[in-house]
Amino acid sequence: MKPISAPDRLDELVARLPAEIAPPPRVWIGIEASLRGRDGALDQLVGRLPLGLEPPADLWPGIAVVAGDPRAPSGARAWPRAAGIGVFALALMLALSALRINELGRELSSNAAYTEAPAGSDVWWLARLDALEGVGAPLTAALLRASLDNIRDNYELAKRQRLAIEAAMQDRLDDPNLRALWVHAYETELGLADRAERMLNDQRRGYGI
Amino acid sequence: MNKYALGALLGCWLLNATGQEAIGQEIDRTIDADPNAALVVNNVAGSIEIRGSDERQVHVTGRLGGNVERLDVLNENESIVVKVVLKDRGRSDGRFNFGESDTDLRIRAPRTMALEVSAVSADVDVGDMRGEQRIGAVSGDVRTQAYGAEIRVQSVSGDLDIAGSDEPIVASASAVSGDLSIRGTAGDVRAESVSGDIEIEGGTVNRVDARSVSGDIGIRAALSTDARIDAMSTSGDIELGLGDNADGTYRLATFSGEIHNCFGPRPADQDNRPPGTELRFSEGKAGARVDIRTHSGDIDVCKD
């Protein structure tokens, strides 16, 4: 039997996502492109989830519910199945983002802090600032430093907002509006970490070099 | 004439002969261009001004700043590339004055060319370009005009300003802390910001998707019969001002903010209710769909 390719399996996952919490199509297009020719990568990536951004407290219980794990905490079982799938999808994005970040990190620096620190942590941001100093034109690096700080501030803002929404969800697990806002805040965090990484990569490839 | 002066003169002659300018020198370059090709512009600091013309040439004027290695104006893979090349680490003494680093580019190009602009702290100003546009800046402001072709603009802290025409547009703008202003628009608009404010003001829209984390969102537009408006902010306020025609289905939801609506049913007493308010109603012939959600921001919906 022909094995299911990674993009096909991804399509299958996407088809199961409720439109309300499905990540934007452009995100999936990017993920699909990164998986082409790497069949089997999906399973590996899911196994690498802890390498990415620090997952929210309810990420793993949500996935456990989807996977039908009887050991999942009872509160987690109350988490609607649809939201669990959405969380799983986000976790997948997270894993792919982490993979790409780490690949870039290896290109940019042999500094372990660059490649191994959890994305979004203090060490992760400091490693990016350091890496910025090491590549490209000095003028651009100086200009980009302030922007990297700006992105980090906004990342922290989105994270605080996400945590506030999670607190509100404690008593309202089935509230679709809170779920949608939570997904939005989390996507924003991911997007900002990705933007910081892309900015660094653009600098390496030559903003005017 | 001593040998040093002779050397300097020879250097100037060589620069002119190869189309290269000295630092601080005025730029004046022209290259033939296919009106259906793409124009790619890259500048780090200073400004980029691009204007559409009827000519079949790209004409670049302006002034080079310090820390510039050279200016490339060339035809590369059927695209016209205008690129300010900076000195890399090996050729720079690592010191620079930000003011002196500015390079100002003024470009006239066939107005049908597709546009791809990349800037760091350079401000970008585009006018009368009718092809597709992709403009990215980091801290520079971006100002452009949108016509029928798709337009995508992005920044980190720079403000973004898109002025539409009467033609329906497909516009996408994204910033981190910069403010977004999309005016005179009709068609499909997507706007995203983290802490910057979003203002969308225009004619009749088909699709608006506006999202922020803490920035406020203001939308003033008329709804097409099958319009869809999605606006979401975690802590920013959202204000929707519609014209006379506000026909549609509405869902307004906030966890701890307040809802103010000038039409439709009144929300529950907001001082004495548990967290989480959702107001759903239809107005007139319900063709359009409006969906607004916040966590702690207020929602205001009125016919202006």
Image: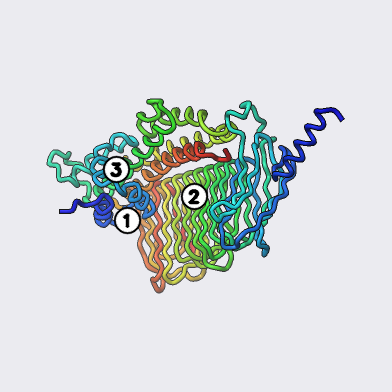
Q: Residues within 10 Å of mark 3 (few under 14, many from 20)?
A: many
Residue A20's label in the rendered image is 1
Residue topped by disc 3: A91
**Residue B216 position in % (x across, y down):** 49, 49
Q: Regarding mark 2 in the picture, which secondary structure is present there? A: strand
**Type of amino acid at the residue the image marks with label 3:** Ala
Residue B261, picture quadrant: bottom left
**Residue A95 position in % (x across, y down):** 31, 40
Q: Is residue B304 visible?
A: no
Alpha-carbon span between mark 1 and mark 3: 17 Å
**Type of amino acid at the residue the image marks with label 2:** Ser
**Residue B44 position in % (x across, y down):** 60, 41
Q: Residues within 10 Å of mark 1 (few under 14, many from 20)?
A: some
Foreground label between 1 and 3? 3
**Subunit ID for the residue under disc 3:** A
Residue A90, picture quadrant: top left
Q: Regarding mark 3 in the picture, which secondary structure is present there? A: helix
